[in-house]
Image (cartoon, rainbow, N blue to C red):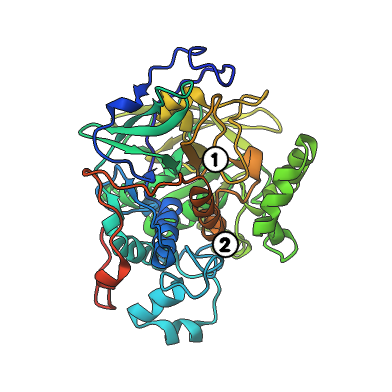
Amino acid sequence: MSHGADSSTDGSAGDPSHAAVETRDHDRADGEVLDLVGIGFGPSNLGLAIAIDEHNQTSSRPLTATFLERQPAFGWHRGMLIGDATMQVSFLKDLVTMRNPSSDYSFLHYLQSRGRLVEFINHKVLFPLRIEFHDYLEWAAERMSHAVEYDQTVVGVEPVLSADNEGEVVAFDVVTSGDVRRARNVAVAVGLAPSVPFGATLSNRVWHNLDLLPRAAAFPRDPAPRRMVVVGAGQSAAEAVAYLHEQFPSAEICSVFSRYGYAPSDDSPFANRIFDPEAVDVYFDADDDVKRMLFDYHRNTNYSVVDGELIDELYRREYRERVQGQRRLRMMNASRVVAVDESADGLHLSIESLPNGRVENLEADALCYATGYRPVDTMQLLGKAGELVERATDGNPVVARDYRLQLDRPARAGIYVQGGTEHSHGISSSLLSNVAVRTGEIVESLVAHRPATAPLASASAAPMTPRSLRPVPTAGLSASN
């Protein structure tokens, strides 16, 4: 769920002429103004939509909001919905429970609506199947369909300045290819983009693991592939190795990574406290040296690590093949891919052993890069509005505790970010495990910064419909694809 574009210019606050930023005049407003336009509709902004909806049920001044998503329907990492893969966070860290345990948007309420609550309890697990949690997200997104417009690609965000108050930012115009929506606030949650090594080119034979399932399903079986290579050392890489090993029973599956072995994730109770909501406060208030120390200490809770059970399973498979004398699973540890040449017949890979520098040449049918993700540049997406965002000395945007970007001039309008805040809010700040609390904090900030007069919705984007007027999906409702 990524949108994209990049540019930023620093300047002094309070001087509307200091930067070459093209803006829209407040007097040019066409219609009324929303409280919020959300860009992207993945789990983070879905959680925000629900938090706004629940706020509106008890507020005499409901917030008006709409969300824009470039996909045709809700979807979250569909290419990695492997049948037996489980979530790595508790089902209690759903979209709402840690903010509002009585919410009817909880995972438990979803189970009840699907007719599986008793069976799930009997299952005695904290970590549901990934496909089930995705169905939960789709179920929630369907109930919030009144708040989102799909097939909407945001091409820019333009600040609207007051004509009579020294260029104060009073709103933003969110521009899509076919419309403009004006709002007092913008919430950006556009997720992550696939990361591949410098110079790598994706093709029908070279994939990122984000597309593992559709690529593997479409890969020719006649003739059967002889060798497939997975690059990476994290959870997604290990899952891709296991999946390809099962799906292509005659192919050799090579796992290439620079470590000596897969590193297990640390999900022990004390280590997991780094994901507690209170940890965001601790991290935010710490000085830069302490922030770096905490981040480095706790990388093994989330980055380039693998679930211990999956490590054991891959080792069992490799050892069994050693006993049987028919090895298909090959661990090429302490190694890296140094060259990839593609032809009509396949791939020619050069793989270097890091300890001794020896290079082994392999012929392969497919290469899967499970090399992680990079944050989408929010400033690029914001365009002209991004030029108003203040930067710290390290180049990172300045983000307040309520996830509101600090602008370089007076502003009544705000830009909120869900993602790209690890430098300010810590390792857990943008993860799924903190969605419920984070979105509640953003709603509180929206209310606190709201002007005295009640905002009205523009004609191009209706306010959220009261929940009492909307049907609730039942167990028979199928998830969208």
Residue 403 falls in which quadrant of the image? top right
Residue 31's x, y, as percent? 24, 38
Amino acid type at mark 1? Arg
| Circles 2 and 1: CB atoms closer than 8 Å | no
Looking at the figure, which quarter contains the C terminus? bottom left
Q: Is residue 225 above or below residue 274?
A: above
Name the foreground residue: 175 vs 196.
175
Q: Which residue is mark 1?
A: 404
Amino acid of disc 2? Leu
At 45% from the left and 72% from the top, the residue drawn is 103
Q: Residues within 10 Å of mark 1 (few under 14, many from 20)?
A: many
- Mark 2 or mark 1, earlier in chain: 2
In the picture of the structure, the residue carrying the numbered disc 2 is: 310
Q: Is residue 224 left or right of residue 318?
A: left
Check disc 1 and report its element: helix, strand or loop. loop
- Name the residue rendered at 51%, 63% in the picture: 87
